[in-house]
């Protein structure tokens, strides 16, 4: 709302005031009506505040979207390259840790036990001890046959993997 000067004390007062708040002199008899140009100015004053708020929201969504895309790319790259880093079971004595190396006598006993249970094992490619119980993973005939031999209460059980 525009300000006008009081005709008596010459201080600025509202054009809609009925009297001057400083000296009490009556204002003009009819308050001025707002002109259409003034309304446009009010709307113009409001518009930048709305724009500033929406710019902040736009900046947040751009940052959030960029961060999300970056995370997806990192996860994708790690999953593609991570396949080489996965722990693979040892498939021969060379791959097995030093404290789990299997002796020739154990290989012969495993081969005889597998054959005695009716399974095929002409040559043993690798043997790995179980880590949680007493037993072995046995790989026979160029890894074509895989067996588990496990001690269950003094009885050695052969199962096909």
Image: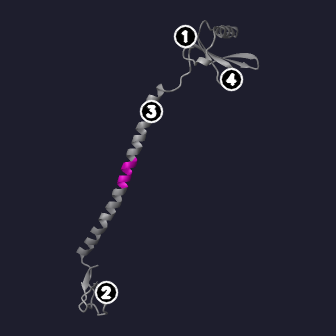
Question: Disc 1 and disc 4: Cα gap in Å?
Answer: 26 Å
**Magenta region:** 57-64
Question: Does label 4 or label 2 sit earlier along the sequence?
Answer: 2
Residue most extreme to the top: 122
Q: Point out the tag, 3 or 2, that comes first from the N-terminus.
A: 2
**Which label is found at residue 28?**
none
Question: For the point 30% across and 64% down, which residue is it?
Answer: 48
Number of other residues with Cα within 10 Å of mark 4, as a class: few under 14, some 14 to 19, many 20 or more: few
Q: Which residue is mark 4?
A: 133
Sequence-earlier tag: 2 or 1 = 2
Per the model, the C-alpha gap separating discs 4 and 2 is 95 Å
Which residue is label 3 attached to? 78
What's the residue at 57%, 17% (across, down)? 96
For residue 95, which quarter of the picture? Answer: top right
- x, y percent for residue 140: 59, 11
Kindly identify which residue carries mark 1.
Answer: 142
Q: Secondary structure at mark 3?
A: helix
Q: What is the CA distance from the residue labelled 2 to the residue labelled 1? A: 102 Å
Query: Residue 52: percent from the left, percent from the top?
Result: 33, 60
């Amino acid at each position: 709302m525009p300000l006008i000067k009081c005709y008596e004390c010459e201080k600025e007062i509202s054009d809609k005031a009925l009297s001057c708040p400083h000296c009490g002199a009556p204002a003009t008899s009819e308050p001025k009506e707002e002109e259409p140009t003034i309304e446009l100015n009010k709307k113009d004053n409001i518009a930048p505040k709305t724009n500033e708020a929406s710019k902040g929201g736009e900046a947040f969504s751009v940052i959030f979207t960029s961060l999300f895309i970056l995370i997806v790319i990192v996860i994708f790259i790690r999953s593609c390259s991570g396949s080489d880093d996965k722990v693979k079971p040892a498939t021969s004595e060379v791959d097995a840790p030093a404290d789990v190396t299997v002796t020739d006598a154990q290989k012969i006993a495993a081969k005889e036990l597998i054959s005695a249970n009716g399974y095929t094992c002409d040559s043993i490619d690798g043997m790995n001890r179980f880590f949680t119980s007493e037993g072995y993973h046995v790989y026979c005939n160029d890894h074509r046959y895989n067996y588990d031999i496990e001690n269950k209460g003094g009885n050695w059980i052969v199962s096909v993997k």
